[in-house]
Amino acid sequence: PFNNANNARQTGIEQENGKYIALLDDDDYWHEKHIENNILELENLESKKVVLISNSILIAGQKEIRRLPERFFDSSQESVAEYLFCLKNNKKTLMQTSSFFFNKEVGILYNFDRSLTLHQDYDWIIKVDESKEVLIKQTGFNTSFYVVDINQNSISKKSKADNSIRWALKSLGGYPKEVIINFFKNNTLWMMRNENIWNVIKQILNFKKVLGISFLSTLPLFLKILIVKVKIFIKKYWV
């Protein structure tokens, strides 16, 4: 998967002989009724092109810590990009690969980008939404278990913030400015916690130059990253 999980996903989709595709990352798992529930749900829908998304139960240290999303996507009110990155009523959202279930036709028409090494789930579901030809429905099924702390070598943890910024400028550039700014503040900045502090400042200043984002608006997250880095340093050298 470190060579590119999207390559494995798209190859599997193209070689599959069945009608449906269910994706599962190697450190996640499903409830035993996950496939059955999604097949029944999809077969009861009139639309021929559908992506079903089940709820994700977040697991850390073998314990449930949260269930997401806290609000559902409404295509009549917002785009998937706006849903994912613009917080409303302080309710968190999520569309994660291991919760996707769809017709094989959708996977053939809308490919997972084999060259992409980060934000793979975001990239694909946003692209599907932009087509305006696919029904994206969150089912409410609590059947996808999303492990958030076991695989310390995941691609997302290895990714550099500048790659995240390049993806955002390319993929989110056509959306309202608040979408890309919120993505940067809530996703890219957090990725910087493992980077040199001077690089964090450099990336913030570069992003400010491109979009006119205020450094002060990023200060709370910047301080949060700084605290995390201090804790890591203390644990490494004094504990």
Image: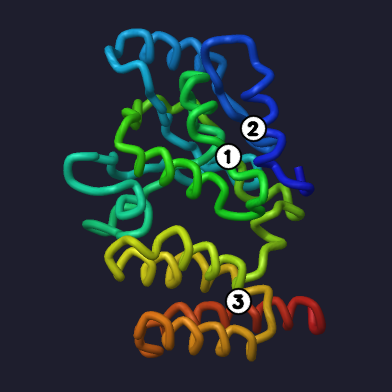
Q: Position of residue 100 (x, y in %)?
A: 49, 30
The front one of 34 and 166 is 166
Q: Position of residue 85 (x, y in %)?
A: 36, 58
Point out the image quarter for the C terminus.
bottom right
Is residue 19 left or right of 185 when viewed as pictured? right
Furthest-left residue in this view: 76
Foreground mark, 3 or 1? 1
Disc 2 + disc 1, Cβ < 8 Å: yes
- Going from the N terminus, do you reach mark 3 or mark 2 first? 2
Q: Residue at x 34, y 61 (%)?
A: 174
Q: Residue at x 58, y 39 (%)?
A: 112
Q: Position of residue 3 (x, y in %)?
A: 78, 47
Amino acid at dot 2: Gln
- The circle on residue 228 is 3
Is residue 82 left or right of 121 when viewed as pictured? left
Question: Is disc 1 placed on a helix, strand or loop?
Answer: loop
Amino acid at dot 3: Val
Foreground mark, 3 or 2? 2
Instruction: Name the residue carrying label 1.
Output: 112
Q: Residue at x 77, y 48 (%)?
A: 2
Disc 3 and disc 2: Cα gap in Å? Answer: 36 Å
Question: Is disc 3 placed on a helix, strand or loop?
Answer: helix
Position above or below: 183 against 115: below
Asked if one can make out residue 166 in the rendered structure from this viewpoint, the answer is yes
- The circle on residue 10 is 2
Disc 3 and disc 1: Cα gap in Å? Answer: 33 Å
The front one of 15 and 213 is 15
